[in-house]
């Protein structure tokens, strides 16, 4: 089972990997920079090299880099779109130093321009970025549909992928499915997990599914709220997570927790989730 949690990047790569091991994780997610700002620390290449050795030895990975929340490729204002493009490009340049990593981003919010216009802007940005062949696979995260978020259903994700590939056929694109977000988006993964995954397969293709964000939800099905809860303490519930982590289409994917927990809480949650999988 590949399981881990979102970990603070303040101490660097090797520190994150050590923290992961200390909580029973073999994967982890981190922010590439301040999630609410834009500045990234200069990459410490000694730290990265030490991390790559440690990760290979300990069997850690794939690690998942999360773009900042402020990255909005579908924004109305050109300077915000420019920030999104520059940030993603810079993140992908940096991730060339950690082969095997994946990069996850929120597709964006169309802020009243309409989903169609938003999808077009996001695809155009990805198309420009993928003029260069990066090694890292870029994942579009399924969203809760809060406000004007793109990615509120599988069809919007598919549309961005299709249009990007029309511009950049070699773009490495995948999807990160967030359990809280799809639940809040109206997909009943508690009572209709098989049907939801079949719909994903028909719409996007399960081959594109590369990562799972494991979060319970504070809100009922279809609430479009995006408030994460600890596993088993929200509306999704522990039995649904038992089916999720054991599902044949999901069980070999890396699972990343983004629940409201400190490090000790994540250690407990990882233990709980490992306990749901028969050995
Ligand atoms: Fe996210
Ligand atoms: Fe998420
Ligand atoms: Zn969320």
Image (cartoon, rainbow, N blue to C red):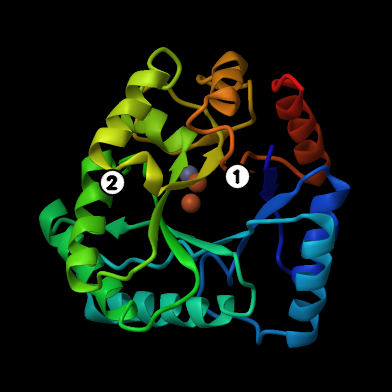
- Which residue: 39% across, 45% down? 207
- Horizontal side of 152 relative to 93 (left or right) equals left
Figure quadrant of the C terminus: top right
- Which residue: 75% across, 49% down? 26
- Which residue: 80% across, 46% down? 263
- What secondary structure is found at the residue carrying circle 1? loop
Figure quadrant of the N terminus: top right
Mark 2 neighbour class, 10 Å CA radius: few under 14, some 14 to 19, many 20 or more: few
Eyeballing the image, is 64 above or below 267?
below
Q: Is mark 2 within 8 Å of ligand 3?
A: no
Mark 1 neighbour class, 10 Å CA radius: few under 14, some 14 to 19, many 20 or more: many
Image coordinates of residue 65 in percent, x first then y, are 57, 63
Sequence-first tag of 2 and 1: 2
Q: Give the number of the disc on residue 214.
A: none
Q: Is residue 174 visible?
A: yes
Residue 127, located in which quarter of the rendered image?
bottom left
Decide which of 224, 131 is in the foreground and name it.
131
- Horizontal side of 87 relative to 60 (left or right) equals left
Eyeballing the image, is 166 above or below 243?
below
Give the total number of marks visible in the rendering.
2
C-beta proximity under 8 Å, tags 2 and 1: no
Q: Which residue is mark 1?
A: 254
Eyeballing the image, is 275 above or below 171?
above
Decide which of 97, 56 is in the foreground and name it.
56
Decide which of 53, 122 is in the foreground and name it.
53
- Horizontal side of 235 relative to 80 (left or right) equals right
Image coordinates of residue 234 in percent, x first then y, are 56, 22
Q: Which residue is mark 2?
A: 147
Q: What is the CA distance from the residue labelled 2 to the residue labelled 1?
A: 28 Å
- Which residue: 74% across, 28% down? 274
Q: Is residue 257 visible?
A: no
């Amino acid at each position: 089972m590949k399981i881990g949690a979102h970990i603070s990047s303040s101490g660097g790569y090797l520190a994150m990997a050590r923290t992961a091991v200390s909580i029973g994780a073999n994967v982890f997610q981190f922010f590439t920079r301040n999630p609410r700002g834009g500045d990234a620390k200069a990459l410490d290449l000694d730290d990265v090299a030490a991390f790559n050795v440690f990760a290979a030895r300990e069997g850690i990975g794939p690690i998942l880099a999360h773009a900042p929340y402020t990255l909005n490729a579908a924004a109305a204002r050109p300077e915000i779109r420019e920030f999104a493009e520059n940030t993603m490009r810079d993140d992908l340049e940096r991730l060339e130093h950690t082969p095997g990593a994946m990069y996850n981003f929120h597709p964006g919010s169309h802020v009243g321009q309409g989903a169609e216009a938003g999808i077009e802007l996001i695809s155009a940005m990805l198309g420009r970025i993928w003029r260069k062949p990066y090694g890292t696979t870029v994942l579009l995260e399924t969203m809760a549909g809060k406000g004007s978020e793109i990615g509120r259903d599988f069809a919007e994700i598919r549309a961005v992928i299709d249009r990007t590939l029309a511009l950049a056929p070699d773009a490495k694109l995948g999807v990160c499915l967030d359990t809280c977000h799809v639940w809040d988006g109206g997909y009943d993964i508690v009572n209709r997990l098989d049907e939801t995954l079949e719909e994903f397969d028909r719409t996007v293709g399960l081959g594109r599914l590369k990562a799972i964000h494991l979060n319970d939800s504070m809100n009922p099905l279809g609430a479009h709220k995006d408030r994460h809860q600890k596993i088993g303490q929200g509306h999704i519930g522990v039995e649904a997570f038992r089916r999720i982590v054991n599902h044949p289409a999901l069980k070999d994917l890396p699972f990343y927790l983004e629940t409201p927990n400190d490090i000790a809480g994540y250690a407990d949650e990882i233990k709980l989730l490992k306990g749901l999988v028969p050995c």
